[in-house]
Amino acid sequence: MAKKKKKKKKKVKKSRKVSKSRKASKPRKKKRKKSKTKSRKSKKPRKLSYKAPKLVEDGDGKSLIKVSDSWANHAYVNKSQYLKKYKLSIKENEKFWAKEGKRITWIKKYSKIKDVKYSKDDVRIKWYYDGTLNASANCIDRHLKKNASKTAIIWVGDDPADTKKISYKELHKNVSKVANGLKSLGIQKGDRVTIYLTMIPELAYVMLACARIGAVHSIIFGGFSPDSIATRINDCESDYLITADEGVRGGKIIPLKKIADEALQQCPNVKKCVVVERTGNQVN
C-alpha cells in the first residue's frame, strides 16, 4: 500500500498588535556610562566636619586642650608616628635628616648632612653645608604651580577687624617688587640690610626679598629705642635701613621714622633709608 504523504503545514507568522502609543514613541537611546576618570574629576572635595577642642585640667590643675577625634584623624601625624620618627632621629640621626632634607627644593643638592662639634676650643654647627638653596623660593615659588590661589599669610592688624589674606601669587608679586626695588637702590648679594618695622605685611615682603637677592637681613623689634637700634646697626655693619612712617601698637602711634632718624645720627655708614607708608601721616 502506498503511504500517504503528509502535507506540510505552512507556518503563518502572527502579526503582533502594536498600540498607538507605542507606535508614536521614539526608540530609546542607550545611556553611555561615564568613564571613571570623568566622574573623578567632577567630584567635589569632601567637606570635613570638626568638633571644637575641649578644655580640660590635668592632675596639677593646669589647663589642657584636648584634641577631638575628628581633628586627630585628619592630622598629618599622630602620637605613635611622631614617636617613631623621633626615635629614628636619635638612633640614626644622619639617615633621618638626609631624608628630611629632601622635603625642600635645592639649587644644588647636598651630599653632606652635618658637621657639628661642641668643645671649649672649637664650636661649629653646619647642616647640609655643601648644598645651595634659596629660602625665598622655598617659601613662595615652589607653591605657585599647585597652590597659587591658596592663602600664604593671614595678617591681623592692631585692630582685629583689620585683616588680610595674602595668597602665594600675591606674595610672590609683592616680594618680587620689593626685591627689584632693593636692587635698584644698589643692594647686592652679601650686603646687610636692617629692618625696623612693626608687624605689617611689608615686614614679610622685605625679609623674603632680602633672602631672594642674597642680602643679609637683621630684624629689629619695633619697640626699641634709638640707642638700641644704633647699636645693632653698627654691630652688623649694615649699609641700609628699612623702616615705616609710623607704627600702630595697642591703639598707640609709634613714631618709627622719628626714632630711626635719631638712631641714624650714630650710624655714619648707613647709605640709604627706605620708608614704608603705614599710617600715611606726615613725617620728616
Image (cartoon, helix red, strand yellow):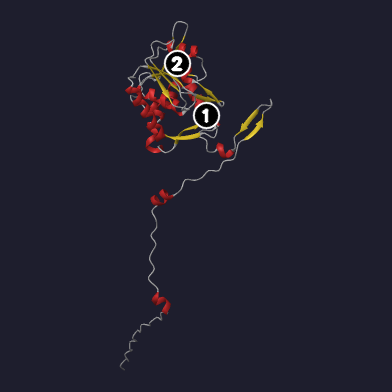
Between 202 and 256, which is closer to the camera in this rendering? Answer: 256
Residue 17 at x, y percent in the picture:
41, 81
Q: CA distance from mark 2 to mark 1?
A: 50 Å
Q: Amino acid at mark 2?
A: Asp
Residue lying at 48% horizontally and 20% vertically, measured from the top left: 256
The relative height of residue 188 versus residue 170 in the rendered view (above or below) is: above
Residue lying at 63% horizontally and 30% vertically, measured from the top left: 64
Q: What is the number of the mark on residue 56?
A: none
- Residue ranking furthest to the bottom: 1
Q: Is residue 166 visible?
A: yes
* Residue 172, quarter of the rendered image: top left
Label 2: which secondary element: helix
Between 173 and 88, which is closer to the camera in this rendering? Answer: 173
| Front of the two marks 2 and 1 | 2
Dot 2 corresponds to which residue?
261
Residue 225 at x, y percent in the picture:
51, 15
Within-10-Å neighbours for mark 2: few <14, some 14–19, many 20+ = some
Left or right, residue 46 beside residue 14: right
Within-10-Å neighbours for mark 1: few <14, some 14–19, many 20+ = few
Residue 3 at x, y percent in the picture:
32, 91
Label 1: which secondary element: helix
- Residue ranking furthest to the top: 121
The relative height of residue 174 versus residue 273 in the rendered view (above or below) is: below
* Residue 24, quarter of the rendered image: bottom left
Left or right, residue 238 beside residue 163: left
Between 116 and 248, which is closer to the camera in this rendering? Answer: 248
Residue 222 at x, y percent in the picture:
50, 20
Q: What is the number of the mark on residue 82?
A: 1
Q: Quadrant of the C terminus?
A: top left
Q: Amino acid at mark 1?
A: Tyr
